[in-house]
Image: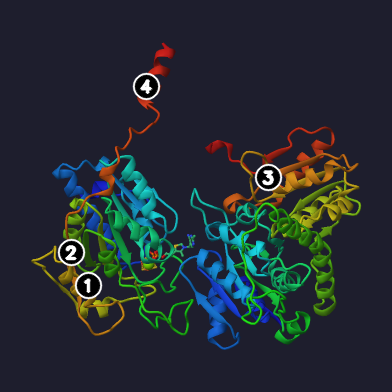
Amino acid sequence: MNPNELGTYAKNTWCPGCGNFSIFNAVRAVLAELNYDGTPIDNVVLVSGIGCHAKIVDYLNVNSFYSIHGRTLPVAMGIKLGNPDLNVICFSGDGDCLAEGLDHLIFAAKRNIDLTLILHNNRVYGLTTGQYTPTSPKGFKGKSTPLGTEEFPINPLELMIASGATFIARGYSHGIDLLKRLFREAILHKGFSFVDVLQVCVSYFNMYEVYNKRVYEVKSSDLGNFEEALKLIRSWNYNDSESPIPLGKFYEIEAPQFDRLFPGYEPHSVDTDAMIKDVLDNLI
Amino acid sequence: MMKVVEGSYAVAHAAMCCSPDVVSAYPITPQTHIVEHLSQLVADGELRAEFLTVDSEFSALSVLVGVSAAGGRSYSSTTSQGLALMYEVLYNVSGMRLPIVMTVANRALSAPLNIWNDQQDSIGARDVGWIQLYSENVQEAVDTTVQAYKIAESLEIMTPVMVCMDGFILTHVYEPVELLDKEQVADFLPPYRPTDILDPQNPKTFGAFADPSTYTEFRYLQYEAHLKALSKIENVAKEYAEVFGRDFGGLLDAYQADDAEIIIVTMGSVVGTIKEAIDGLRAEGTKVGLVKIRSYRPFPAQALMKELKNADVIAVIEKDICVGNEAALLTDIKAAFYNSNLRMPIIGFAAGLGGRDITIKDIRKAVEKASAARKGIESQFEFLTLRKEIL
Ligand SMILES: Cc1ncc(C[n+]2csc(CCOP(=O)(O)OP(=O)(O)O)c2C)c(N)n1
Ligand code: SF4
Ligand SMILES: [Mg+2]
């Protein structure tokens, strides 16, 4: 499948230069590839929260569900439990899933439900135009914090490894090849996959220069080593302005999946073919 | 001082003049500018308050529960999804009799996703025990904010207040507004002096268990406080007019209603359009008038009956829909009139949902329907501007 076939006619309203374009292009390429490899695109469901990130589901011609702010994961969990054969991919913002819906994130990881969560981590509320979020560095001067925040940021990866996520990685919107690799592996991983993407918001928190100087890719040879992964994850705390920022896959283990505990159910829906046949039969 | 400012700024400025100890809110369109302006006022040192940014609306209001119980004056603002998320806390606030004031920048609810104005959000929260005051324009939202604190905090009321203003239409408009003078507000609004607060010297419990032997009485006292609020709202509006020279009405306000045969009843910013429509219709000889409801909760049944008693027909136009029945205000008015001797037809329209404009033409259509209803009711309730072609 040509990735372009997965586009839609929806008008793109992301700011020029927004890191969301890389996520979009990487996801689109990976879905096309997976389709080619035998994961039918019709079996894929995209679930989004509310925010700039969420618009991605408007731009991809794939089954999708626009949820409400903060509730990306519970909706996705329901979809997955209803039909465990579906491949469910979630797009959530740092506001969406680390503020408003943080509890759901912890439970998704704790249950190790087979979902992929891509965090569009621009470290700002983009859609509401520039307020601080749980990953903004201390002192961040946003529109709701003109004097700078007083809080330290959350390290979402640390939270995820502590909560039981079985696939943890970090990418950067300036680096589409790595994003493609990480997304592909995350989607194929059985269990809860968490991919933090340092997605630059050019309008409200432009970090390109900072990230470009500091990111480096790691290739861990011991992905199942909790201590090693934690060390790597803690090597940058989303706050300090000196440490190098590792990118790549940090952790991957196998563990029982929550979604395998349920039988799933046959979806009840209208049989449109039968309805059309019925109408035609009655016409004749 | 008269200044051309954004509605959100004017309201933030009004909230500042009321000197809250703590402000807490979460950004959501079209309320965001209100909190941003407030955080700036705090940063500039104009407002000496704690400004707490939080992780959700649920937290924002919960924080204020603590603030208020500990004896602080508090302010928040939200809208739509945010108000919906606060639902559980809304009952907590009113049940604990915490006089929090909150601006609701009225907006439609999902699904489908929509960020524009209607009043479904606050109407959906009409039974949570908060007083609800609706504003016609930015100036009224400003003035009502100050009045709201005075009403909420008076000891015989001790009930939270939502000051409702139409999202975008009022929050984002730039218009000339008389900004308040902090000292003048301080003279008008006495310091917050609750009798029941969390005090280490005098321990108390908030939100305690009330079993069936006392729960009803808690609810009764809230009900009674709302009844008392009926006169309080009137009196505070009068006092306010004396000090500040502006009067948008107490429980309600009327326009060209004295000799009107057809009276429109509504709430919020559409009042302006309706007044214009009325001027046109009057010039053509149609006797139309308007009653604007300021206080939706408590519901001003007696005041309404007095104002509407001479009309031949009443047409309610409102920006909400109670799916499964009709629209809220319509039901309330009919219910209020049933046990009286007033027997004019009362018809209603849901309009302006999800931000659809209500034009003078639409108002005229409602008036035509009302006129027809005088001769016998055709339809009691309908959607005023339904695009049948896309159904
Ligand atoms: C309950 C609720 N509160 C607030 C909002 C308003 N809102 C919409 S998007 C958003 C934040 C988006 O930030 P993030 O999740 O980081 O996404 P981004 O826009 O940065 O991609 C907020 C607060 C909402 N839609 N619902
Ligand atoms: S506001 Fe930021 S995150 Fe949103 S589209 Fe623009 S650049 Fe991207
Ligand atoms: Mg964000």
Q: CA distance from mark 4 to mark 1?
A: 54 Å
Q: Are marks 4 and 1 on the same chain?
A: yes
Chain letter of the residue carrying label 3: B
Q: Nearer the viewer, residue B200 or A162?
A: B200
CA–CA distance in space, label 1 to label 2: 9 Å
Q: Is residue A211 above or below residue B345?
A: below
A10 and B118: which is toward the camera: B118
Quadrant observed for ligand 2 in the rendered image: bottom left
Find the distance from the CA under tag 3 to the CA under tag 2: 55 Å
Nearer the camera: disc 4 or disc 2: 2
Question: Share a chain, discs 3 and 2?
Answer: no
**Which is closer to the viewer, label 3 or label 2?**
2
**Quarter occupied by residue A193:** bottom left
Q: Is mark 3 within 8 Å of ligand 1?
A: no
Residue visible at 31% across and 70% down? A200
**Disc 3 designates what residue?**
B327
What residue is pinned by disc 2? A251
In the image, is B266 to the left or to the right of B259? left
**Residue under numbered circle 1:** A233
Horizontal relation, residue B302 to residue A255: left or right? right
Rate crowding at label 2 as few (under 14), some (14 to 19) or many (20 or more) other CA atoms within 10 Å. many
Q: In this rendering, is residue B124 above or below A179?
A: above
Residue B28 in view? no
| Gap between marks 4 and 2 measured at Cα | 48 Å
Whether pointer 4 and pointer 3 mark residues with C-beta atoms closer than 8 Å, the reply is no
Q: Residue furthest left?
A: A221
Q: Position of residue B353 (x, y in %)?
A: 60, 50
Q: Amino acid at mark 1?
A: Ile
